[in-house]
Image (spheres, grey):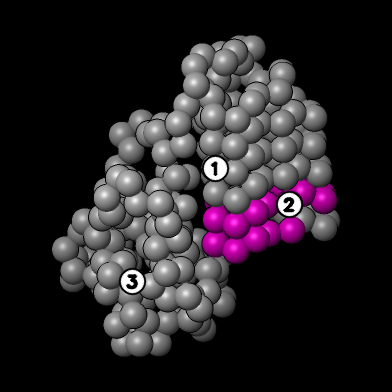
Amino acid sequence: MKNVLIFGASGHGSVVLDILERSEEFQPVGFVDSFIKKGTKKNGYPVLGSEFDLLHILEKHGVYGGIVAVGDNWVRRRLVHLIQRLAPNFIFINAVHPSAILGKNVRLGSGTAIMPGVIVNANSCIGDHCIVNTRASMGHDGVLSDFSSLAPGVGCGGNLRLGTGAAISLGSLVIENIGIGSWSVVGAGSLVLDEIPESVVAYGSPARIIRNRKAGEPYLGVNQDRKTLQLPLNYTA
């Protein structure tokens, strides 16, 4: 089995760990996290250090690759870019729960997490470093662009087009043939009946555009995942 790392020891990291423990290909060796003391155990696995210890960790533990387990799309993107700068040949793996159902001709990028109970229907494409969370479903021919996410319980009709970094929040429903622009957020429990442009917040039933949104603006409830990366706010990797 291949030794792998999980970047981020938050609750999301625990879910990704659970998936990797069920894998017949990958063996987690520990977490990388900037805000938890080195040596701390999380779910029985040690925090091996921060991102800036990465080269030492790779050599010491014979690491094949890993996955960034950070729920916030923007922070996940920043961390991926930092890893690529520190270790240009680092391999990002996918974590796919065995209960997930992937249809015919579904394509996955790298670094993507597919959680328990997910259904992805035929001819859909999921990009790099995406999250399809618990019991979310995608209709046929859908596209999730890099760093985008579907929260638990999201249901999407066919031909969804979800832009880079965009997020559809808990329990929302999206009818067929809908595009949602890059870095937009659809609020929890929404019903999306019309196209949504990039960089906005929309919610309601039916969903309406509420305001504009800047890329990187927090959108998760407590947003603890923002603590997983020690970088200045103007870092633009």
- Residue 66 screen position, x and y as percent: 46, 70
Tell me which label, 2 or 3, sits earlier in the chain. Answer: 3
Task: Identify the residue under disc 3.
Answer: 30
What separation in Å lies between label 2 and label 1 (alpha carbons)?
Answer: 15 Å
- Residue 87 screen position, x and y as percent: 42, 76
Q: Amino acid at mark 3?
A: Gly
Looking at the image, which residue is at 59% across and 37% down? 182
Looking at the image, which residue is at 52% across and 74% down? 91
Task: Identify the residue under disc 1.
Answer: 165
Task: Identify the residue under disc 2.
Answer: 125
* Secondary structure of the residue carrying numbered label 1: loop
* Secondary structure of the residue carrying numbered label 3: strand
The answer to which image quadrant residue 39 occupies is bottom left
Q: Amino acid at mark 1?
A: Gly
> In the image shown, does 165 or 1 lie closer to the viewer?
165
Against 174, residue 227 (above or below) is: below
Against 47, residue 36 (above or below) is: above
**What residue range appears in magenta?**
107-130
- Residue 78 screen position, x and y as percent: 42, 54
127 falls in the magenta region: yes
